[in-house]
Structure formats: C-alpha cells, structure tokens
Image (cartoon, grey):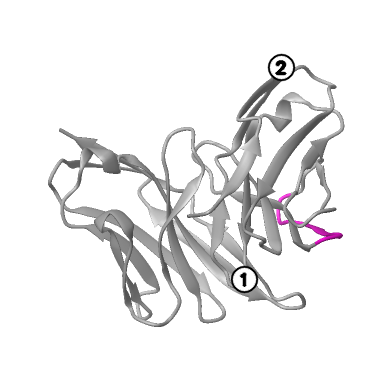
Amino acid sequence: EADIYQTPRYLVIGTGKKITLECSQTMGHDKMYWYQQDPGMELHLIHYSYGVNSTEKGDLSSESTVSRIRTEHFPLTLESARPSHTSQYLCASSERGNTQYFGPGTRLTVL
Amino acid sequence: AQSVTQLGSHVSVSEGALVLLRCNYSSSVPPYLFWYVQYPNQGLQLLLKYTSAATLVKGINGFEAEFKKSETSFHLTKPSAHMSDAAEYFCAVSALYSGAGSYQLTFGKGTKLSVIP
C-alpha cells in the first residue's frame, strides 16, 4: 500500500493569493509527479521530478512552480491564484519502475 | 508518442452483470498498460498493470484485463458487478523517457461506471 499524502484536501481561496499545495511520500521513491485533473478529462502531467534538486515541466503548461529539496517532499506553488487555476491536483510517486502511486488529491477553488 | 482512447464516458450495468470497460491504445514502443480506479473525492488507486509477462492480468477486487496486441486493446472486465464498483476508471499507457529513465503515464479520459441495484 502506497503512503503518499496531500494537504490540504480542499482549498477555497480568493484571486491573487499565493498558495502552496503539499505532497509527501514515505516510500523513499525517487520520482514524483503533479497532475491536473478536470471533470470528464484525462489527467495532465504538469510537473515531475527525478530526484532531489531535479524538476521538469510536464506536457500541460502551468503557471505553477515546484521544488524538490528533500526526497519525500514535492510542494507545488501558485504565486497568484486565478479562477482558471480551479481544478483538482494529484500528486504521485514511483520507484525505478513505471508504477505510479497517487495521493488523495487537493481540490482547489479560486474565487 | 502514445495515446489512450476509452470508449464510453459512462457505462451502466446491473448488479451481478458483467462489467466491460474498453481501452484502446497507441504506442510507438512496446507499452506498459494500467487500469486505475478513482472513487469520489479520492486519488487514483492501481487496479492492475500489464508489463509483458502475461497477456491476461488479474487485479484487485475481481477485475482482470487482457492485452491484445493485434487489436491494440486492454479492456477491463469483471464477471459480476457489485455496488461498490461504482467509480471512475482510467486506462493509462506508459513509455520510457530516455535520459533519466523516467516512465511517464498518458491517461484516457476515464469511464464512469454506475451499478444499478
């Protein structure tokens, strides 16, 4: 069973606020990912990391940024939230293989 | 490049009936294939995966999927639906990205399964 945690689970915030979505995993996985999920749509990869101090942008352009200072921690930051950022954000991690394990997600609403 | 097509955004079955969720993929390299399930307000949970060891893959909760290369399909089945199976199901294909050796997943749009009592 995968142990990957995301906080907060739900967040409602006003336009222009800075927010950080937290993701932590206790499995020691090198690789971590952030996906954006909208209703009726496929998951889109927005960021990924191969390990500490490694971050890359994914297929879907995003105004968010990420950091990877510790293996277990992969936070996502939005400097100035906008209504277009309203979505569900899913964090995942994987070992050397290709199976990804997902956290419970953060549902973000920007008013 | 790879892609996934899930036929039917919404499938309804009666409790006890066969569940069949369709997934077709395209991949320029031999694929790894996955089915994930997502319950309301939760993340994705791995149901099963195909990694070329056997074409018929058994997963959790009584689900299985068969890899058919000639049809580029990886359909998910369960002989008898249970009310607890109501959820959204995502098919995904993975390919190896060179460099750091990272696998990345491409997802279908999902199929929402409803189970009618």
Residue A89 visible, this angle: no
**Residue B106, position as x, y percentages in the image:** 57, 60
Q: Which residue is pictured at 68% across the width and 54% down the height?
A: A33
Name the image quarter holding the N terminus of chain B: bottom right
On residue A70, the disc is: none
Q: Residues within 10 Å of mark 2 (few under 14, many from 20)?
A: some
**Residue B2, position as x, y percentages in the image:** 57, 68
Numbered marks: total: 2
Q: What is the chain identity of the residue bearing mark 1? A: B
**Alpha carbons under labels 1 and 2: distance apart:** 37 Å
Q: Is residue A16 left or right of residue A25?
A: right
Q: Which residue is pictured at 75% across the width and 49% down the height?
A: A73
Q: Nearer the viewer, residue B112 or A25?
A: A25
Name the image quarter holding the C terminus of chain B: top left
Q: In the rendered image, which residue does mark 1 sit on?
A: B1
**Residue A49, position as x, y percentages in the image:** 76, 59
Q: In the rendered image, which residue does mark 2 sit on?
A: A111
Q: Quadrant of residue A32?
A: bottom right
Name which residue type carries label 2.
Leu
Helix, strand or loop under label 1 = loop
Helix, strand or loop under label 2 = loop
Compared with A65, A18 (above or below) is: above
